[in-house]
Image (cartoon, rainbow, N blue to C red):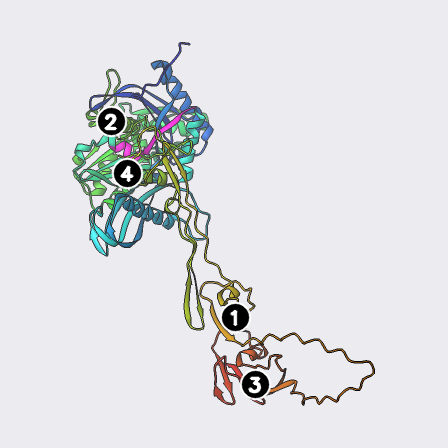
Amino acid sequence: MAELKAQDKDLVFALDIGTRSVVGVVGRPVGDRLKVLDVEMAEHGKRAMMDGQIDDIKQVATLAKTVTDRLAGRLGVALERVCVAAAGRALRTQKGSFTLELPEEQSIDAEQISRLEAGAVSAAEEGLQSDGGDRRQMFLVGYTVAQYRLDNYPMANLQYHTGRKAEADVVATFLPGEVVESLYAAMRAAGLQVASMTLEPIAAMNAAIPAELRLLNLAMVDIGAGTTDIALCRDGSVVGYTMATVAGDEVTEAIMRSFLVDFKTAEEIKRTIGESEDLIRCRNILGQEERIAVSEVVQVIQDPMDKLADAIAKQILNVNGNAPSAVFLAGGGSKLSGLREKVALQLEMDEKRVAIAGNNFALSVFSDSLELEKPEYATPLGIAISAGLGLLNDSYVVKLNGQTAKLFRNGVLTLRDILLMNGYSYADMVGKTGKSLTVSLDGKRLVFRGEPAIPAVLEVNGEEAALSATVHAGDEIHFVPATRGEDARRTLGELLGESFYGKAMVNNAIAPLDRPLAQGDVVLTLRQTPPPPQPEAPAAPAQPAYAPREAVVQPAPRPREVHLFLNGDPLVLPRKEDGAPYYLMDLLEYSGIDFEHLDRAVRLEVNGVERGFQHALKEQDSVTITLS
């Protein structure tokens, strides 16, 4: 076998991993169009994809390698770098907002805008995470800033404006991590390096609707086997994408049920519709030869085609708000006889405004020997066109911490974009200060600040870089996420200080000084005067042996007990060693009330008069402690 040449920098290799087949396209840019050198297609032997999502990675990798090897052999080139597209089925769109408080009024720079947008994208991702469930890694596909505000005033652009509070609202689109990872895993298993990734609906639009036509409100509908991807453009840019779970397989399955044939035979029957024969010859699952009238097949597929047309129309109207100016149908399912007319009817559009994609391919792509104007080529050609004409670049490989970064390219990328697309959040980039601790001490609100974050490390090609810096092909990014600061912590003793002497209550319960405080705790204290230090007794003078001793008069002993009444019952307490009185607070523990689980206020009375916790008690006082 002849030795294969290395893949040139400008040689584009694209793979479309579909539910039914894998299609490979190789080409290179010539002027403002892509010249296609070769196309190869191979079908899955059994179902390896479910609704556009890879189910059997090994089988997909084997088929991708088969397509790659065939193209490499015919072209004499070792194909190693590949451009791919992820199915639109799993797309998730979410709004997010973020506010950046500035320490003083200042001019807003690009770095602060990057932080602001990254925070809003991270907020959108947080909104996608299910309550109480495991977090799913999400990969950013792209986002649009819906609104900036500066000091509550709406702005179109924040840069160079001066203010104290900047806000951003974004609409961000994500793919679940498993969708991206399975595609990368399949390509690695096939011996290929993913150079770039886009979305199938965007790729198909790049082939079917060139940029110069996107000033109009147009819809591109890519009808595959498992899913139908939809993208809409207006005013020069893509304004939305969605998908329908109804696609070509529903039509195939209706044929299977009606004529008792296997899936492969049903697919062949579906492709035969519209050809000149009146009868279709096949073998059913019982092994019997069948002759099926085309008119009978057409009748069987009307219901699933109605459902498909209805689903397409509903999704277009849901995203676009009304019928677009025109609709392009792409993908193998677009060739179903009568579907174009059904879509036009559901959208209440002139049939002439719903077309089969392919007529515009020549604006962006050409070949000396291959027929390219096929609607099923929309996505594979779109991936190749996007790469070859600068919308994507197959040599655009960026390393992040030694690994090839996952990229969804749709123009210039910044470091912020790369990090967000690879699963990092705003907190990873900027860091968060630890949580503050707020408590109340004798009616005064105290706030203890958390520790500041340890900043992130962000370098490009060994040099420190800003989040807003533009990333170029071949850049190597080193990123160490910021470490969140420690939360503020205090014990009751640390709050009160070493000089405190007395008792303290936390949330109406007497608490030890080593008790950790929690957010919102209410602390009440009863400070007492510590006893004075006792001087050391002087040594007794030596007495002469057998000398006479003088009589010592002892003072009358003080009462050793305090007698009180608590809720009508007598209460006898030992007198405090320092002679200090008892306070109302001291009697709470004898009241029988569960202060850990209070559901009502506590009423304190002494001799029938309402008093506070620090009221000093006298002998024979009558105390009442009840729940009001």
Compute the Cα span from label 2 to label 3: 89 Å
SS class of the residue under badge 1? loop
According to the picture, the residue beneath numbered tag 4 turns out to be 230
- Residue placed under numbered mark 3 in the picture: 567
**Whole-Å distance between the Cαs marked 2 and 1?**
75 Å
Name the residue type under label 3.
Asn
Q: Which residue is mark 1?
A: 500
User: With respect to residue 497, does 73 lie above or below?
Assistant: above
- Amino acid type of the residue that numbered disc 2 sits on in the rendered structure: Leu
Q: Looking at the image, can residue 173 be seen? A: yes
Mark 2 vs mark 4, foreground winner is: 2
Tell whether label 4 touches label 2 (CB within 8 Å): no
Q: Secondary structure at mark 4?
A: strand
- Mark 4 or mark 3, earlier in chain: 4
Q: Amino acid at mark 1?
A: Phe
Q: Name the quadrant containing residue 268.
A: top left
317 or 166, which lies in front? 166
Q: Position of residue 480 (x, y in %)?
A: 42, 40
